[in-house]
């Protein structure tokens, strides 16, 4: 039986307002990162989906222009017997 554990994290990212566009572009190029909201004072609400422990979260935190990245929500989903190339995976939004 194949099982994949997908970590889903909600993150409040504080960004230097002068670098917000650069940070957004960097995040948009990262697999597993999705921007949901931007405030006028340089805050981003993002979700991070990753299979293993925190590499993407660390990359978010280390992005030039990021002042702080605070985890505000975490959950994980366990997917069993899903072929990584199947339509089921694509529909579920899994990032493997």
Image: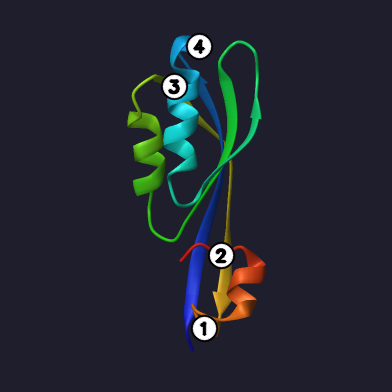
Q: Residue at x 44, y 27 (%)?
A: 23
Sequence-first disc among 1 and 3: 3
Calculate the distance from the C-alpha at mark 2 to the C-alpha at mark 3: 26 Å
Total label count?
4
Q: Nearer the viewer, residue 5 or 30?
A: 30
In space, the residues marked 1 and 2 are separated at their CA atoms by 11 Å
Question: Left or right of 60: which side holds 10?
Answer: right
State yes or no: discs 2 and 3 in contact (Cβ < 8 Å): no
**In this view, the mark in front (2 or 3):** 2
Q: Earlier in the sequence, mark 2 or mark 3?
A: 3
* Residues at discs 1 and 2 in contact (Cβ within 8 Å): no
Q: Residues within 10 Å of mark 2 (few under 14, many from 20)?
A: many
Q: Quadrant of residue 62?
A: top left
Q: Secondary structure at mark 3?
A: strand
SS at circle 4: helix
Residue 80 spot, x, y in % from top left: 56, 80
Q: Position of residue 45 (x, y in %)?
A: 61, 31
State whether residue 56 is above or below residue 41: below
**Dot 4, how many residues are within 10 Å of its Cα: few (below 14), some (14-19), or many (20+)?**
some
Residue for badge 1: 83
Distance between mark 4 and mark 3 Cα atoms:
13 Å
For label 3, the residue is 68
Q: Is residue 30 left or right of residue 47?
A: left
| Spatial CA span between label 4 and label 1 | 42 Å
Residue that numbered label 2 is attached to: 94
């Amino acid at each position: 039986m194949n099982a994949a554990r997908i970590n889903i994290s909600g993150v409040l990212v504080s960004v230097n307002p002068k670098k917000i566009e650069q940070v957004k572009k960097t995040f948009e190029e990262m697999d597993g990162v999705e921007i949901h909201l931007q405030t006028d004072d340089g805050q981003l609400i993002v979700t991070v989906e990753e299979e293993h422990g925190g590499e993407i979260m660390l990359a978010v935190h280390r992005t030039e222009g990021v002042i702080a990245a605070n985890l505000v929500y975490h959950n994980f989903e366990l997917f069993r017997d899903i072929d990584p190339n199947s339509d089921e995976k694509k529909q579920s939004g899994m990032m493997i």
